[in-house]
Every structure is written in C-alpha cells, then in structure tokens.
Image (cartoon, rainbow, N blue to C red):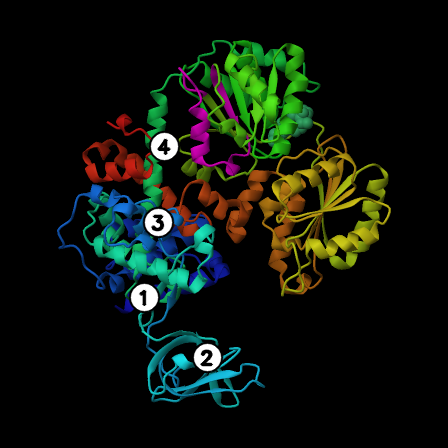
Amino acid sequence: MENLEKARKFIQELESNRVKLKRSYGVGIYLFNLLKQHLESTYLNLLKEFDKLPIEKRIGILKVIKGRLSQPAYKKAVDFSHVEKKPIEKFFLPIEKVSILDQKEKKLLKALGINDLYSALWYLPVRYEDRRLNNSIKTTKPGQKVALKLRVLETGYDPSEKYPAYVKCEDGTGILYLRFRYKDQKPLYAFKKGSYIVAYGRLKEFKGEKYMVHPEVSFQEEEFGKILPFYYIRSKGEIKAISSKTRHRKIRQAIGKLLEYVKYMPEYLPEELLQKYQFPNIAESLYMAHSPQDGDEDALNSRATPFQRRLIYEELFLFQLLLQIRKRQISNLEAVKLSHPEKHTEELISTLPFKLTEAQRRVLEEIAKDLKTGKPMNRLLQGDVGSGKTVVAMAVSYAFAREGYQCAIMAPTEILAQQHYENFKRFLEPLGVKVGLLTSSVKGSARNSVYRHISAGNISVLIGTHALLQDRLEFENLAFVVIDEQHRFGVMQRREMLSKGKNLFPHCLVMSATPIPRTLALSLYGDLDISIIDQMPEGRKPVITKLIFESQMEKCISFIRSELEKGGKVYVVYPLIEGSEKVELKSATESYMLWKSLFPDRKVLLMHGRLKDQEKEAVMREFKESADILVSTTVIEVGVDVPSATVMVIESAHMFGLSQIHQLRGRVGRSERQGYCFLVVPDSLKNTDAEAIKRLRVLVQTSDGFKIAEEDLKMRGPGELLGASQSGYFGFTVASLARAEDRYLLELAKEDAKAMIEKLNHMENLKKVLAYRYKDSIDMSYIA
Ligand code: ADP
Ligand code: MG
C-alpha cells in the first residue's frame, strides 16, 4: 500500500514539474519497482521503456498509469455486471420512441442534435461541480466554492445597500448571509423562516461576517448532495429562449431518466482489451460519467477517471477501426486508370514559368503511381504554405482533363476558390482545358450554365466552395477530387464530394498546410497515404524573423515605413479582438486606431472574426487591391495570396503557438521580394518568462514547418494546431488531441485496431455499434 502511495505522489510531482521529469533519470525503473506488485503487465511494459521515450510520450504514459491507479475507488461505486443485458439494437431507438421521456424532453434532446438513445447516453458532460454536502460554514475556508445545507433564520431588505436583499442562515456551526441584488422584496418570500435550503457559491468573509453573493439556491435539494454534471448546450432556436440554469436542469433531468436504461447495455469492446487496460465496462462507464458517485472534481474535469478513460479509448479505438475498414473498402473499389499520367503532367509543367522542386517531383511520382493502379487514390498532401501544393494538384488535374475526365477542386472560402480559379485558368485554358467556378455568389443564369456544362462534360475542371456539394450539381464523369485546406472540411464532406463519381470512384487528393508530426499524422489519417512537400521553391527566401521587445517598436515602425515606400504591404496581428481584463495584452480593435494615427497617409484596414464571411472577404480583397496595412486577429485566411505583402508584425507573440505564427508568417514573402516577420513581446517578459522567449527563438532559427510543429508539441502541447477544431474534424467528442495522454491512447488504439480487425467478424455487438456510429461513412459488408 505504501508503495502505491509513493508512486502516486511521485507521478503527481513529475506531472506538475516538467523540468524535473526532463532531468530525472531512471524514473521508469523506479516506478516499475514500486508498482510491480500492483499493475498488469501492459502497464509495467510501458514503464520498462519509459526512460528512452521522448518527454511527450513519457507524460502520456504517466497519465495513463495515474488513471489506472485511481481506479479501485471508482469501481466499487456501481456494479452492473450481474444485470441481464438487452440486445444492443434496443439502444439505437429513436428519441421519439423513448417512452420514459415526455414531449418537452424529447424536443429538447432533438434540439441538441441527439436523435437516439445511444447518442443521448454518449452526450457526455463537459464539466462537473462537486456539490456534495460535506462541508459546514465553519469548515469552509473563505474563497472556497461549496454547497451548504442551511436553515433560514430571517430575511431583510435595505435599498441603500449594494446588495439590498439578504437571507440570514445557520447550519449549527455558524451564521452565513446570502446577499442578492433584488429590485424588491418579492423574491425573498420564497425563503420561509425555519425552512431548509441548499446554497452553492463562493463563501467570503468580511470583518468576521461570512456571506455568499448570489449563490445558487435550491429549495428541493435535488441538485445537491452530489457531483453535478454540466452538458454542452448550443444556444440556438428554442433552447435559447430558456434561461441557462433551467436549460442545464432540464437536460440533466432528461438524461438522468435515460440512465435507467444504461445498466442493460451489453459490453461491445473485446474482453481482452478491457482486461489489458483494466477498463470498467460500458454500462458502468456511461453511468459514472453522467452521475459520478465519487472522486474529485479536478480528476473528473480533466477526464482522468478510469471510466472517462475507457470512453475516450473507445472513441479512439472505434475511429481506428473505421480507418482500417475504410482502407479495405477503398482497395475494393475501382477508379479510373491512367496509363501515362506523366506524359500530361510534364506537358503542363513545361509551360510553367519555373522549375518544380525535387519535393514536388517526388510527390507527382507518388501520385502517378497511384493513378496507374485502377484503385482509388486517397492521399494527403502536406506542405507549408507556399511550398507549391496547388501546382501539383493542377498538373494532375490536367492529366485527367486530357484523358477526357472531370476534376473538382474544393476550397474552404470564396476568396481561395476565386484565387485557384484564376490560377488554373491562366495555365490550363491555353492548353485547351475548360475551367469553371461555382461558389454561392455565382447566381442565376450563370449558375445554371455551370450546372449544364458540368453535366454535359463541357467544363473539365470545376473549382468551388461548399457549393460543389449541392445535389443539383451532376458531373458527367468526375474522376479526381482535390480538397484544399482539409481541416476546414469534415470527413463527411469529403465523402459526400467523392460520392459524386458515377460509375467509377474518384481519386482524392487532400491538401493541408498544417504540419502534423508524422507519427501523429499516421495515426489520424490511417486511411490515407501521405505525401510531404518539405522544400520551398528555389529563390524563395525564408522570411527573416526578428524577436523584438515593445520598447524597440520605434525601429520596427520606421522599417515598415520604408517597406511601404517600396510598395510593400503589412499585416499586424493581435491575439485579441478587443481589450480585456488582462491589460498587458493589446487588442486589434484598439490598436487599429493607433496604426491609423501612425500612418495617416496610408490606407489601414481592420479585420476580425466577428465579421461575417462576406465582410471578411471584402476586407481581404480591398487589402489586396488598394490598402497598405491590415490590422487583424488570426482570422486572416490561410493560403490567401497577397504577393506584395512583405511584413508581418505579430504583437504579444508569446500568446501564440509556434505553428500558428509559422502559418501567419507564410503569408509574406510570397514573391521574389524578401519577407519579414517581427515577433513583438512585452519587455516584462525579459525577466519573468525566459522560457517563452526561448520558444519563440525556434522561429527565428528555422523555417521548417514540421520541425516547428514538433517543437510546439514538445514545449507547450499542441495548442491551436490540434485543438478543438482538429478534434472536431475527426468527430471526437470526448477524446481531445490537445491532451498528451489522449494522443498516446490514440497510438495504442491504432495498434489494437490493427490486431483486432481480423477478428471483428465474430464480434457481433462491436460490429453493430460501429455500423451504427459510422452509418454514413462505412459499408460494413467489406469486413470479413
Ligand atoms: P501552396 O498551395 O502550397 O500554398 P502554391 O502552389 O499556391 O502553394 O504556390 C505558391 C506560389 O509559388 C504560387 O505563386 C506558385 O505559382 C509558386 N510556385 C509553386 N511551385 C514553384 C516552384 N517550383 N518554383 C517557383 N515558384 C513556384
Ligand atoms: Mg494553398
């Protein structure tokens, strides 16, 4: 027992102190010895290799082990192992047919996008509040957030006070005042003298008097005495009309009712995997996630409890199975076969005003090889902004067009689509290939004409936005699909686009400028082959990057002046739209005025995420055509080409991820002109945060996006790079790629899925869940 405690403490220490973890040797062996009596071999094996692994992985392993160690305490709380299970199909019941819910509850769940019992049970809380009544007025420290059961002594109202209404209470250990900013006395009538209430809030103390300001009060106790879950609520439409507190209570009630069913849910993960990780079963895991009986708020909120780990693992494991199945599925499909794609790509390349880089050539070869197989290509093309991905896509499109097939290029924004359109037209039309454009601003007869020409096969290469997904758009013989900036589109949209092929399945090239370290990319895109352009075109000078302190801003401004005189344009990026409590951070809106006053004779524009898409595009267009300085948040479009932009100023640079800055600076120096990037940090950082400065220096030293991404992961976690948007892209709801332990679990899940796919045929429940979860994206007949 003592060893267990020691190990727990040690892990906690290492987790809170990365430097210690980095510098300690023999951590793995030490933990191994402490835990060898207590852990299964899967976990012990992780520790054996521990000391040789990169820090990122070591952290993941520590978290996995911590989760395992905290397990027994939870296991006892509920036990459904002896309950007779129902068939898994029962759980796929549509919400309308769930008789335990009333009409209002059904409506509420539907409004949240929940369509069936299974999804409702998987609609997991996003956070928890510990409202168990374990405290008293006396034991609570000022500043602590607690739930207290109280008896009402008296109420009073004094309009001259800041909080005119008060309720005086006691709990046998002391006196507590609840204070409210009510406009009159009426709300006080609810507090009956002598009755019991529960209040949840932060206890404060002033001159010996203890009080809470606007605590949450319950007269029924139903929401107290337990750990309370909170669910994500989109406030749209009908839901918006209900107050937030009521909303939370209602969804809690609805899901609470559904928990009645959960104990009947049969297990569907393979027993050997549950054994391997010592995970609790599905019924207990779901129950505990919605209604935790025990455990501490922090562990729950960081999703570190074993039942949450199991759910996260399950999500990642099913995703990995999906990738495995898809890969098989695609290898069974037929696609157009080109026997000599090189002949055509070379022809196009010979008309370009530059020579391809070696990396571009290599990627073209990889693609050509795919196209000769007669099986659909499914390839991810990664490369920094400006590395020349689009040219590759253009050459391949040309090859298809010459053989009489159609291509579709889907870009995330109208301005990017427009840019591609002009680009493709410039090079393809002289060679006799017709290029078309379809976005939401192509309207009326022009739009109808595009539809007509596409279905008749007169347009060979169609470039567009989401508009390409429209049902009305029918291709004559779509054979090649390019998806630009993949992270802006979901997996489903990719599939939808590919379903526009007719007799044969289209080849697909997915392009991304977000560098993801290779191992992670392999785990996330297991269904795609990966090509990388890791070389910039010749003559393209790397952006000169300088780290400066705010006190040196003068120099930067006079530099900008001279660049503007030479005809350059300037971006200035801020981490915030508007000022906030954190005074030391500057905001775009406020600084916009400053830049205007600094450059009264120049055209300065402002852009931020609160503008509508069309407004953003208008600003971008104006900047490209006639303005000089663009003050912005990070919303500047990825990939937008303003060749005359030469300076990128990033204010409060320490607030950004390295990869994010790298992406931003990719927007300057996109021509023969030298690009410059200034990373501006407050002078105070010099003394307080040397680590932040060291981190930013990586950007000064290298312009290799992959190196920077690795560095980002190592130093501060993936931040923006793999934050919520990326997790969302893969359809994860509980797993988050921003957490080291989840990324580590992803790799384990991948290995498990590979090993398990052969046996899948015998696992009826697992197959049913897979087919149900991914009903639109896989055809289960390919298993076997
Ligand atoms: P990406 O799509 O990877 O951001 P693009 O294909 O748009 O990059 O290329 C960026 C710019 O560089 C374009 O203007 C393109 O014409 C040019 N370019 C592409 N490949 C080369 C090359 N090998 N040599 C010189 N310029 C190139
Ligand atoms: Mg691009």
Please provide the residue range marked out in magenta: 477-506
User: Disc 2 marks which residue?
Assistant: 186
Q: State the CA–CA distance, disc 4 to disc 2.
A: 56 Å
Q: Quadrant of ligand 1?
A: top right
Find the distance from the CA under tag 1 to the CA under tag 4: 37 Å
Amino acid at dot 3: Ile
Residue 446 picture location, percent across and down: 61, 22
Between disc 4 and disc 3, whose residue precedes?
3
Judged left or right of residue 416, residue 176 is left
Q: Split into 4 quadrants, where in the image is the C terminus?
A: top left
Q: Is residue 104 above or below residue 484?
A: below
Closest to the camera, between mark 4 and mark 2, is: 2
Q: Which residue is mark 4?
A: 777
Tell me the CA gap for discs 4 and 3.
21 Å
> Residue 90: x percent and y percent?
21, 44
Provide the residue designation for mark 1.
295
Amino acid, disc 1: Gly
**Mark before the other along the chain sequence, 1 or 2:** 2
**Point 13% across, 51% down: residue:** 84
